[in-house]
Amino acid sequence: LILLQHTESSLFHLCNHFSSVDKVSVGTKKGGRLLQPPTPIIRAGNWPTLAIKKTTLEDLSAADAGEEYEEEEAAPVSAATAGVAAWDDDDFGAPDAGVGGADEGFDMGDDDDMGWGDDLDDLGDEFGDDAAKAAPVDEMAALNEISDDAGFQMPPAGRPPAACWAANSSHAADHMAAGGASSAMQLLHRQIAASDFSALKGSMLACYLGSTVSLPGIPGSGSIIVPLMRNDASGHPGNDSLPRTTSTMRTLVSGVRQGYRFFQTGKFNDAKNSFSEVLSQIPLTIAESTNEANEMKEMLEICREYITAIRIKGAMAEAGSDPVRSTELAALFTHCNLQPVHLLLALRSAMGTSFKHKNYIVAASFARRLLELPDMKSERNADLRMKATKVLQKSEQMARNEHTLNYNENAAFTIDCKDFVPIYAGEESVKCSYSGSTYKGTEMKGQVDLSDGFCTIGVETIGLVTGK
């Protein structure tokens, strides 16, 4: 009894204690929010769908069970229908039927069982020995009857874009865009006899990196690589796709114009670098039309002529103390195929050098060529026109050369791009298949061209492949 009273007292104090405790707030704190991963933005109608019929073992088993059930349901219906039809044949309800007529209406048959033995005969099929001898049912037999069309078939895999690019083109830029650096270098070696690919490394990497774009996916997933094609204006070309390249005619024209500006201001090293960069981009540029292909070949010749002119200008600075060599180099400098405004500067320099070293015959020739330029008629060149006229008058009066020069302006010749001497018709020479630079003799055969810096001299090839 004492223990019971003590227990009741403890429970009473305990209840009072819990009733005095403040209620705990279960609400969220101010500014709190539920942490959850970001919801991906997916457009429901943006995914390609392909209807594929899937057939599994469970579907085949269910189909077989349904066929057996339909056969069992069809058997009683046919028996009941036959019985009703048999009863309908009796003419008991006919008002004019007599006893004889009733006997004639029954089909008693010729057997002793009077036609009632059919039901008893069927009992032997269910309780006889035939049921014990029934063969077991093979549940997997239905799989042997499945044709190839009924099962699940994966759709055929398409060709990757890189494989199509390499198969559809013989241009090195397309092979490099597909990642085939080996085949691209092999094509360049066969077409333009390229042997030193260090100068082409930047252009080749630009072709590979510029043919695809990386599309970022949802958080936690990788990026999607999307190929860029140049013949998809009217729709996806499929297996006839070709990659888009970074180097275009606009890029080449911009490089040539930059070289012109450097040459005009006397920054010959920068001009040479600009023209050399264009030479390294031309083999990996694809022309979109025949006109672009012709323009590309013209730019190739322009770059070669300007690089040769700049190299001759550097040799003139080195041979400043030799009057014969400096005059010869100044004369050859005027035979480079330059723009009229640049040719004016070259003829002015050659005229001054020849007149300074008392080679009046060639000085008079340069003065005539200078006065024949259209730009000499402008007012800004009035002083130069007056100086050229005075040089021509003085040279015609003296009419002699102080030195014997290896230069004949009346004979057609090409410039040796190594020694900078004239190569007249009939003299032996070798040529670069890509840039067209010519070298006297066979000494430079098999070596790298000094104009472009990556092709072998003296190898006969098909030349530049423009894509058109």
Image: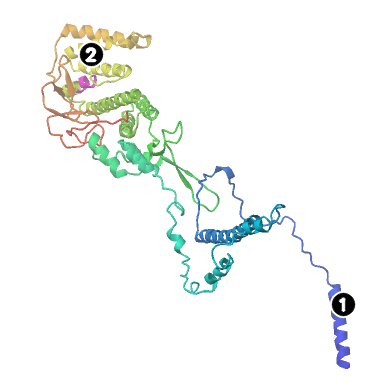
Quadrant in which residue 210 is drawn? top left
Between residue 5 and residue 422, name the one nearer to us: 5
Q: Which residue is mark 2?
A: 366
Task: Check disc 1 and report its element: helix, strand or loop.
Answer: helix
Rendered residue at 50%/61% (across/down): 57
**What secondary structure predominates along the stretch shown in magenta?**
helix
Task: Check disc 2 and report its element: helix, strand or loop.
Answer: helix
Residue 3 numbered tag: none
Q: Which residue is mark 1?
A: 16
Queried whether the magenta region covers residue 324, the answer comes back as no
In magenta, the rendered stretch is 329-334
> Mark 1 belongs to which amino acid?
Asn
Between residue 97 and residue 197, name the one nearer to us: 97
Q: Residue furthest bottom?
A: 1
Pinpoint residue 176: horizontal percent, then vertical percent.
Answer: 34, 41
Pinpoint residue 9: horizontal percent, then vertical percent.
Answer: 88, 85
Colour mapping used in the image? rainbow
- What is the distance, in whole Å, between disc 1 and disc 2 at their CAs? 123 Å
Labels in figure, total: 2
Mark 1 burial class by Cα count in 10 Å: few <14, some 14-19, many 20+: few
